[in-house]
Each structure stands twice: as C-alpha cells, then as structure tokens.
Amino acid sequence: MHNPGEPFGGAGAGTALGPVRFTVSEAANQRYWASAGADHPALRQGALYPPIAANLTILLFQTVATRPLLHTSQRLVSHRRGDAGTELIVSGTVVERYEKRGRDYAVVNAVVTLPDGQPLWTSTATFCEQ
C-alpha cells in the first residue's frame, strides 16, 4: 500500500507498479535527443530516443514513491523501434530494497510496451531518497 511517510512510499520488494500510459510527442522527443547532443537519421524520422525509458521508469516509480528521489543507476535494453506520438504502456516491479551507507535504496524493473503489447524497452533503475 502507498504510504507517503515511509521510504519509497512503503513500496518493498515485489510491489507491482503501473500500468501507466504516456505519449511522447514528436516535439518532446526532438527536444530530448537534441538536448542530449544526439543526431541520427532514425531520430530525425520520428523514432523515439531510447534513453526516454529512464524518464518513464522514474515517472512509474513516482506513482508510489512521492518524495524526492535520486536516480543512481540505469540499465536499458532496447528491443525495437518505437515512433514518437505512440501511446506507451509502462509497468514494473520493485525488485529489491537495501541499505548502503545509511541510505535506503530501491531497484525497479520496468517494461515499456507498445499498444500491441510488444516490449519496446526494458529498464532497470536504482533510486535512493534525497
């Protein structure tokens, strides 16, 4: 259950997250890859920039972990191309909670899928609270 007084809203290992739906517009996608200094013909043709998966993982986790977070690590697997303007479905699980140097950490696995259910990106992110 969500408990804003607890670290990470009380989410422990095994807590299911989502699904939540997001649509990244063409303009937002262009701003994202341009600000990262990336340029590729596929991006100019409307392909979603894969590191957006990190932001979607953060937004997914923030549905339960509402206090400020530090995003400490990220691993991303890209399965296929997705196009800007397509609705994306993000779901995941808190897979681990641990303490290190007096701070609580949470590891989240997220899957970003296309409307037909095909995985677009798989994301594993680690967070601690500020």
Image (cartoon, grey):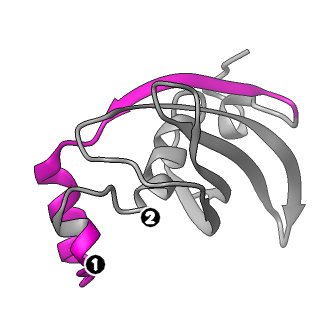
Q: Are marks 1 and 2 in contact (CB under 8 Å)?
A: yes
SS under mark 1: loop
Q: Which residue is mark 2?
A: 51
Type of the residue with mark 1: Ala
In the image, is residue 88 part of the stretch drawn in magenta?
no
Q: Quadrant of the N terminus?
A: top right
Q: Is residue 37 left or right of residue 11?
A: left
In the image, is residue 30 part of the stretch drawn in magenta?
yes
Residue ID at (20%, 75%): 35
Q: How far apart are labels 1 and 2 at the CA level?
A: 10 Å
Position in image of residue 26 (x %, y %):
15, 49
Residue placed furthest toward the top? 1
Position in image of residue 82 (x %, y %):
39, 48
Position in image of residue 46 (x %, y %):
21, 56
Q: Is residue 85 left or right of residue 16?
A: left
Residue ID at (75%, 29%): 10
Dot 1 crowding, Cα within 10 Å, few <14, some 14–19, many 20+: few
Position in image of residue 67 (x %, y %):
52, 41
Q: Which residue is mark 1?
A: 36
Residue toward you, 90 or 101:
90
Q: Which residues are magenta?
A: 14-42
SS under mark 2: loop
Q: Quadrant of the C terminus?
A: bottom right
Residue toward you, 110 or 40:
40
Q: Is residue 119 left or right of residue 20?
A: right
Residue toward you, 103 or 73:
73
Type of the residue with mark 2: Pro
